[in-house]
Image: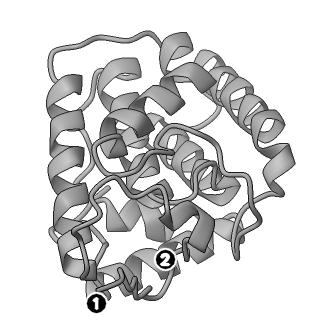
Amino acid sequence: MALEIVYGEGQTPISEEERTGLKVKSLSMQHELDEYEQLNIEKAVKWLIGRKFTAKQVLSEAFLRKLHKKMFGDVWKWAGVFRHSEKNIGVRWVMIGRELKKLCDDTLFWVEHKTFSEVEIALRFKHRLVSIHCFPNGNGRHSRIMADVLMENVFGKQEFSWQASGMVDADEERTIYIEALRSGDRGDFGPLMKFVGV
């Protein structure tokens, strides 16, 4: 049976070429893929526990790629590799490196000059990171963990509460989250701050 991936609101489809990068060929249902990815993500979170990183380390292409590979490397051959195709969201794939560099430089500036509150810096970074859409899949989950890494390592604060669902399933929390991201698109980060409990 072929793997049929069904996408919900706010999820990015994977091309056939990218789908061939699936390491576990026996997966045939979306819920199986979700579970396998979640197990891999939990391993990545365990890897982060107890490690300390500077702002310059976190806000680098190398760290972002490494974290994505830690999160999805057991599932996808292309984990940690920038996408090479256009998506329904994100910058043109040839612009990913440049836009990511600008984002990291901007965020370092915000941190050094206290341009926004610590929470708003982390959420602005998360929002722009997911809108660049560096990878074929997993961008939302990756950007949420990156925001948590910023909170813990750069600001010495507790990670965000991203609600209970993890925003993979199309439930009410995911709908509120997607609407909060859309508000961020318009420059209003209030709903996203409210969503994370601030």
Q: Which residue is mark 2?
A: 11
Left or right, residue 83 beside residue 91: left
Residue 40 spot, x, y in % from top left: 21, 46
Q: Amino acid at mark 1?
A: Glu
Q: Residue furthest front?
A: 1
- As rendered, which of 53 and 76 lies closer to the eye? 76
Quarter of the figure with residue 127 = bottom right
- In the image, what residue type sits under mark 2? Gln
Q: Quadrant of the N terminus?
A: bottom left
Q: Position of residue 168 (x, y in %)?
A: 30, 73
Query: Is residue 60 in view from this perspective?
Result: no
Quadrant of res 51: top left
Which residue occupies 46% across, 43% down?
Answer: 79
Above or below residue 145? Residue 109 is above
Dot 2: element: loop
Q: Residues within 10 Å of mark 1 (few under 14, many from 20)?
A: few
Distance (Cα) linking label 1 and label 2: 15 Å
From the top left corner, tell me how far across and down residue 62 is, in percent. 56, 20
Compare residues 44 and 122 and report the one nearer the observer. Answer: 44
Quarter of the image containing the C terminus? bottom left
State left or right for residue 131 relative to residue 111: right
Q: Quarter of the image holding residue 109?
A: top right
Q: Earlier in the sequence, mark 1 or mark 2?
A: 2
Q: Is residue 166 found left or right of 61 in the rendered image?
A: left
How many badges with numbers are in the image? 2
- Residue matched to label 1: 172
Position of residue 6 relative to residue 27, above or below, is below
Q: Which one is nearer the viewer's eye here, 126 or 38?
A: 38
1 vs 2, front mark? 2
Asked whether residue 11 appears in the rendered view, the answer is yes
